[in-house]
Amino acid sequence: MPPVSRAASNEQDAPLSQTVRRWLKFVVGLVVAAVFLWLLARGSELAALRAAFAQLSVPTMLLALGFAGAGHGVRIVRWWRLLRVLEPRLRLGACVRPFFCGFAINNVLPFRAGDAFRALAFQDELRSPAMRVVGTLVIERVVDVIVVSSIFFVGLLALPAGALPRGIVIAVGALAALGLVALLAAALALPWLQTVLRRVAEGLSGARSAQWATRQGLHLASALQLVRSGRGMLALANLSVVVWACEGASFVTVAVALGVAEPLLGPWLALGVGTLSTTLPLAPGHVGTFDYFVAQGLVAYGAPLATATAFALAVHALWVPYTVAGLLLYWVRGTGARRRG
């Protein structure tokens, strides 16, 4: 029997190592979720938590769900406007399924796997190569960080110094500054980068892998080029404000139902700190991390821990119907494609 070559052995081991890495990431995500859920629950009494949940009604949650849905609708329009600049024939309806499928996978798997899936799996529907889609998602994320950071600092206005841990305030300020620097750097450096990549592509006529990598870089740069349009960025910023206004309305609705003493700024601070915690996408669906920081935002305004915990879990539950919808959209279209095949 001939010996197995080292190259063949490496090829056989590659799928195994990839599987191990995937499971390791998933386990790490579950551990992170468990730690933050424990931190959230350790000071809450079960009876007080039940009493807080009892104040929520079906009409209230449906209203909050409607506000969250409106926010998703504006997100789809916002993303479509970005993609349409580079592909004018793209229809708004073509963005709905990729958006909800990506949202659903982000809420099931850690490390924002849904964003990668959205870029790779829907290139035909979106009439865009994967790296162009990635570029639009990067722009959205950076603008969101800046807008949500602004909401966070507005939410701090009525708080005395030290009401929220200083480390959180510093981290949010650093994120906002990083987002602004990233936009400025992209606007200034992209023309130079595109010129370099085109020259590299011309000089690598015989190297297919290098040409492929260069093309991907050019696709990404073509999307990031959108940050150089003042009118386009202003429209994007306005839509982002509407997105987070809808999201904030869902938070306020739940807070009012729970009888939160500070329903004006408290929920907005919770929205800011909870959303920014998702920039570290370790836990599947941000379970634990999102809930813990949302609760901290409400506690800073004097809400009892049980009320803040119920609030955090309730606003997180608003993600569930849209996650299920995204999974159904993926499953129904996938089933139809298999039947046609």
Image: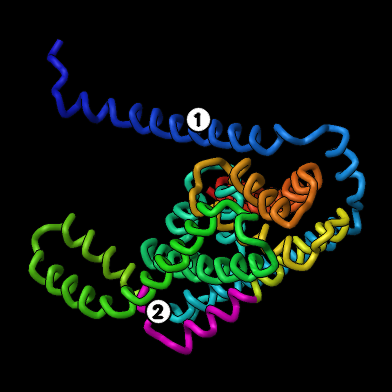
Q: Main secondary structure of the magenta part?
A: helix
In the depicted structure, whether residue 76 falls above or below residue 46: below
Q: Amino acid at mark 1?
A: Val
Q: Amino acid at mark 2?
A: Val
In the image, residue 17 lies at what x, y percent?
33, 29
Q: Residue furthest front?
A: 161
Is there any visible trace of residue 223 in the rendered image? no
Instruction: Write down the residue under mark 1.
Output: 27
The residue depicted at 50 percent of the width and 54 percent of the height is 279
Question: Is residue 63 rendered to the left or right of residue 190?
Answer: right
Question: Is residue 246 rendered to the left or right of residue 147?
Answer: right
> Considering the image in quadrants, where does the N terminus appear?
top left
Instruction: Confirm whether the magenta stretch covers residue 140.
Output: no
Camera-side residue of 51 and 226: 51
Q: Secondary structure at mark 2?
A: helix
- Which image quadrant is residue 168 in? bottom right
| Count of marks overlaid on the render | 2
The region drawn magenta spans: 224-241
Question: Is residue 28 rendered to the left or right of residue 105?
Answer: left
Camera-side residue of 298 and 114: 298
In the image, residue 89 lies at what x, y percent?
49, 80
In the image, residue 153 lies at what x, y percent?
59, 68
Instruction: Write down the residue under mark 2.
Output: 227
